[in-house]
Image (cartoon, coloured by chain):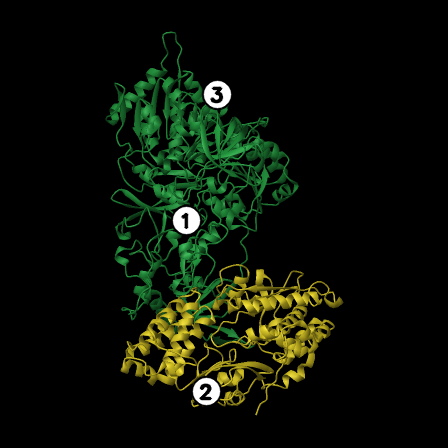
Amino acid sequence: MTATADKPAAEVVDTVTLTIDGTEVTVPKGTLIIRAAEQVGIEIPRFCDHPALKPAGACRQCLVDVASPAGPEGKLRAFPKPQASCTMTVTEGMVVNTQHTSEEADRAQKGVMELLLINHPLDCPVCDKGGECPLQNQAMSHGRPESRFVDVKRVFEKPLALSSEILLDRERCVLCQRCTRFSKEIAGDAFIDLQNRGAQQQIGTFDEDVLDFDGYRPVGAATVDEAGKAFSSYYSGNTVQICPVGALTSAAYRFRSRPFDLVSSPSIAEHDSSGSAIRIDHRRGKILRRLAENDPVVNEDWISDKDRFAFAWQNLSDRLTRPLVRKDGELVETSWPEALAAAAAGIKAATAADDEGASRGAAVLTGGRVTLEDAYAYQKLARVVLGTNDVDFRARTASDEEQAFLGSQVAGTGLGVTFGELEKAPAVLLVGFEPEDEGGVVFLRLRKSLGRQRVAAVAPFLSRGAEKLGATLVPAAPGREAAVLAELPEDVRDALSQPGAVVVLGERAAEAPGAFVAAQELASSTGARLAWIPRRAGERGAVEAGALPGLLPGGRTATLKGARDVVAKAWGVDALPSAKGRDTAGILKAAAEGAIGALVVGGVSASDLAGDVSAALEATGFVVSLEVRRSEIAEAADVVLPVAPPSEKPGTFVNWEGRLRGFATAIRTDAMPDHRVLDLLAREWGVELGTGTVEAVNAELAALGAADAAHRPAAPKARAARNPRPKKGTAVLATWHQLVDEGALQDGEPYLAGTGRVAVARMSAATAAALGDAVSVEVSTEAGAVELPLVVTDGMVDGVVWVPVKSPGSWVARDLRATAGAVVSVKGAA
Amino acid sequence: MTDLVPVLSATWGSEQSWSLDTYTDAGGYAPLKKALGMEPGDLIQAVKDSGLRGRGGAGFPTGMKWGFLPPDDGGPRYLVVNADESEPGTCKDIPTMMSAPHALIEGVIITSFAIGCNHAFIYLRGEVVHVYRRLLQAVREAYEAGHLGKDIHGSGFDLDVTVHAGAGAYICGEETALLDSLEGRRGQPRLKPPFPAVAGLYARPTVVNNVESVASVPAIVDKGVEWFTAMGTERSKGMGLFSLSGHVTRPGQYEAPLGITLRELLELAGGIREGHELKFWTPGGSSTPIFTQDHLDTPLDYESVGAAGSMLGTRALQLFDDTTCVVRAVTRWTEFYKHESCGKCTPCREGTYWLTQILKRIEAGRGTEADIQQLLDTCDSIAGRSFCALGDGATSSIISSVTLFREEYEAHVEQGGCPFDHAASALFDYTDTPATEEAHA
């Protein structure tokens, strides 16, 4: 199929021709006047208007004169009053005169501007928005030079903390309702709304003081989330960005900088697999804030709060700037040449044959956060220098079934289901995937289709995020997903049989034995398309790069000689290792048993892994850690090589769609990307790894291309689904990450952390009843326990307990050493 | 001399005028039975032919409004009665519902039958709890008598009526804000289009009519189109309630054909307060530009009042005699608009806030000559710029009073205070204490 054949036939669009300020313009029917004016470069001032939000017509700043043909002869008839150009759609033959050509429109706009300013404080010199403020700018271009208002301004206490991150200065607010409309229309979190009326109208949370209940408190409590707050949102930062004045500010950026002191660099967010376009604003080498960039095909106008606010992690005091080498048991700073030499020597010694001729191999863990180029360098180092297929990017639960799926369906397949197609899909089935918690802006895209799209979630309960998508629950206890997929309710199956339907598989599909096979069968029987949406930013790229034990770059099977030969030839080596590689869990297990001589570890958080990482590190002869910060693994390593965080290096994230999301260096520092460090390391063996630059890696990847069909792994084979039967006092563990939690990349950002949800344990009413009058639950395994408040959840599968993966007080992998589907002990506590 | 024509008010003087029995004895609910025997389309045509215009103020032809509903698609359509009477001076719907609630309910049933509605709502101003109780009682009686419910009088027509008490906001008299409020949302006007006829209550086709409009329907059905069109003027047909209040000897409701003049009404009402002369008056509530003695003979119909520079509005004639300070009266009205501005759009929200401060300054004698011009300039930034008509209404009394009584504004500025004795204009014992002034703040 050629690229052009893919293109849908150009849609025939009904157009309308009108005249704006004497210029004729033809636009699609239904276009608003303000948008049509933009087409011919005429800017009409506005505050409430935002292209991604429904029209409000609230601020009245965009008034223009309009005349349109009326009557049988079509004589031009002028509207008696100026019209809001942000709410009126164009009609054929309409004549619009903006402030540039109509005195009346200009007078109307100046009048509105004067009114907007009477209650607006003149605190521009200390306001975060000063210098990039639409109100300030438009007051300059369309306002009176001097105010005629000599009376008393309305004042409010400032700021009002809507959350720990979002602060509201009500005095500055022009009540355009962009923030409330965003919250309702886009995010579905109505955590703020208009309150009171007239000049006292204000944005507020559900707060008795603001509402002036004066002792008459509502009888029922407002809908509160588990954090005890009346609504909170993962997308609240977008309201700060679209606020046309300085009313909404973020605690992280408030009073930190002036916009004209900032250098802006476009980049790609590193927190999820969406590859959202962002803008990094930095000053003297320090990131001050991050904003959403408009990218119509990916994140449109929005990003998650994690993408926006979680950037402090890379500049914390534990940032590594120089290589470290262990000397006399202590890690000490050293030079690059010495560190590289020490690393190579250590690995060589640890993997050398002993007196009896036996040797222990090396293994590589890359973590799921590195770029395509980095992942490529790691796996190439493993295969060319270390001679092993023991390389895996999955710092999470992984399975051979998943690997076979990734190799046969994902790697080297290019752009698959896109954001746009996901949005337009008539039906979406979610398997092992929570869009709000694990997908970032994927959630917003799905929510855009609320009411037009049938969403069903195979899950133990319907999360609040899924509820906001109008999803229906297909109940499945962890481990039972495959069986549930095989016997989907008829209506869900029918919905998935519509053209364009999508089955989404998340990273947790790997936790459900047989889920990939069942999903594939479902796809082939219904015609639905499959989309794999991992959680971490680097996962799809690592799949493409072949950072998997069984996969070479481009989806080639590492155990097939033909496939290996193609890659070996391209790399200019005689042969690639043929031994079957181990996955992350296998590597850690082997290491703990003393079977691994040397480990090269990228950005892996030990606390993400259920396996015994410290035992593995201890039993391994030599450990080299490539890290941005002094992590747990770095502390245990023999050599630590500092690498650059994404903002300090160029690279490419491949997002879940398969779209290449390249980014350039935002901040120039001495820090080197992983692929360059590995290239230098390989030289210690006399090997030219060829991964010194992004360009070199991409040239190699391009030359390799995707695997021939014959070289791909076979489709995954069915595995028996687990069917654990919890006994009394036990339950099956369900768990996933909350978007805002205690992940390493959110360190150092307390304001963001405050918007996260309080960790709770969820159970069905029946399951909870078995615990007696419990208000909290102790979930335990042989390895340890977590105790969390109990929330009885409607419609939840019986015999299941859900806890968050890595939220405050609930670090499942570290504390329980368990993964989803495990049978855990549950005990109630009053 | 035009005579009064008590139609809606015909039974108000009867013993227990509000009861079903009184209403039925006076011929009530006979029109309903007649209407149920007619074709809905014929009913709509009859109301169109009658020339009945919306009695809520705007005067839009009622039959035409009904005709805007799209063809029946099988889904629900609604009648919503706007009973959120809140404008200063306007006091006709409350007495109607208080004295003869069945006139409204019968009108609701006939209108619902005509437009194919099976669930009608009466959105009542929340402050009038006594009227709320009375309406609830009347609806209960109507259900018990078989006028409401399933298969009404064997016609096969079903109708439920819900009486809803608002939470007290002037804006909810604006029909789209009313619908939002009725749906349980914050009462603020909606963008139009879509108009309520296409997507109103719960996004379904909806007719929103004023109490008096709906209550006039049974009489039109009963007495015929000719009877109705025989009253009034060429384009303002029928009768209407004229609410006289203020410095008048016998304030109250005067039901008369449209086109009657204030001079005639004053004769019926015993004239202006003894020993005083009419100074200014509102023809249709506080959001209509004020009139003076010069307009005593202006026929009170939509066209004539409009031609004279004001609006017939709700026929709320507030009469002020020569003891009244116009600045003071206008300031009170403006404070009302400031308090009731919903806050949605900039001009009304900020403009009324500013206007109030300027007016209070002038009234207190702290104003300047420039302030008077500022009043007009600020009004200019509101009128025609606001989201709904309420913003325009807030400016009417200011613009008209500055035009007609500019010298009085100037007197406040020059004398550094109000030249009037406030106690003289009061109809009760009154002292100008800071406390009473505070009460208005």
In the rendered image of the structure, the colour used to display chain B is: yellow
Residue at x 68% of width, y 81% of height: B224
Between tags 2 and 1, which lies in front? Answer: 2
Q: Is residue A283 above or below residue B6?
A: above
| Residue on which disc 2 sits | B273
Along the line of sight, which residue is nearer the eye, A206 or A602? A206
- Seen as rendered, the residue at the extreme right is B154
**Residue A371 found in image quarter:** top left
In the rendered image of the structure, the colour used to display chain A is: green
Report how far apart the C-alphas of labels 1 and 3 lie in the structure: 47 Å
Between tags 2 and 3, which lies in front? Answer: 2
Mark 1 or mark 3: which comes first in sequence? 1
Which numbered circle lies on residue A580?
3
Q: Is residue A746 visible?
A: yes
**Crowding near the residue tagged with mark 2, few <14, some 14–19, many ≥20 C-alpha atoms within 10 Å:** some
Please indicate whether residue A185 sits to the left or right of residue B66 in the image: left
Q: Is residue A492 above or below residue B187?
A: above
Residue A739 image offset from top left, x and y in percent: 44, 40
- Seen as rendered, the residue at the extreme top is A356
| Residue on which disc 1 sits | A236
Residue B267 image offset from top left, x and y in percent: 52, 90
Along the line of sight, which residue is nearer the eye, B88 or B42? B88
